[in-house]
Image (cartoon, grey):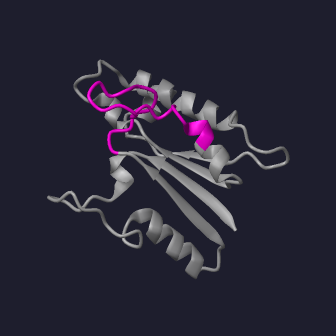
């Protein structure tokens, strides 16, 4: 079985609009992806790690624990072996309390990618592939 870790913020969390309730796993896109791949006879498990307000490498001044770099290596280690890590962060870097530009957010993503590549996995385990799904402005800043 291949495992996929989706590391994201509230955009993947699955909030039901106008409520504080959450969609069931089967209705959130990672669940839909896992079910669809399983129906196509792919042996896959999608692991969700979503936190509302998570940033790439910065803290939220009002809610602690929103720095995406903190604990990332341990999440890779805990869930290994992983075939893929999907990063979906960057949007919260642009909140009004941060003076960040697209370049800063892109550097944050680059830092997370480096942390994934250096995560302390067991000897002989493969390093996971990385897929970064970024806000539209970030790919331009990374070039």
* Left or right of residue 101, residue 107 in this image: right
The residue drawn where x is 46% and y is 27% is: 57
Image position of 8 with respect to 57: above or below: below
The answer to which quarter of the image holds residue 22 is bottom left
Residue visible at 59% across and 49% down in the picture: 85
Q: Nearer the viewer, residue 81 or 133?
A: 81
- For the stretch drawn in magenta, the main secondary structure is loop
Decide: is 91 above or below 10. above
Q: Is residue 13 magenta?
A: no
Indicate yes or no whether the magenta region holds residue 54: yes
Residue 17, image x, y percentages: 19, 60
Residue at point 41%, 64% (across, down): 29
Would residue 117 appear left or right of 27 to someone viewing this image?
A: right
Residue 11 in picture, x, y percent from top left = 34, 50
Stretch of the chain drawn in magenta: 52-74
Total marks shown come to: 0
Q: Is residue 8 left or right of residue 83?
A: left
The answer to which quarter of the image holds residue 39 is bottom right
Give percent across and percent down for residue 20.
Answer: 21, 57
Q: Would you identify the image quadrant in which residue 94 lies?
A: top left
């Amino acid at each position: 079985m291949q495992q996929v870790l989706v590391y994201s913020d509230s955009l993947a969390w699955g909030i039901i609009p106008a409520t504080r309730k959450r969609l069931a796993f089967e209705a959130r896109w990672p669940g839909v992806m896992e079910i669809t791949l399983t129906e196509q006879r792919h042996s896959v498990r999608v692991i969700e790690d979503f936190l509302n307000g998570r940033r790439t490498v910065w803290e939220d001044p009002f809610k602690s624990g929103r720095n995406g770099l903190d604990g990332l290596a341990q999440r890779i280690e805990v869930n290994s072996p992983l075939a893929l890590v999907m990063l979906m962060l960057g949007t919260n870097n642009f909140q009004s309390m941060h003076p960040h530009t697209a370049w800063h957010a892109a550097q944050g993503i680059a830092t997370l990618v480096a942390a994934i590549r250096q995560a302390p996995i067991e000897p002989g385990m493969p390093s996971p592939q990385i897929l970064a799904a970024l806000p539209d402005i970030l790919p331009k800043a990374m070039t």
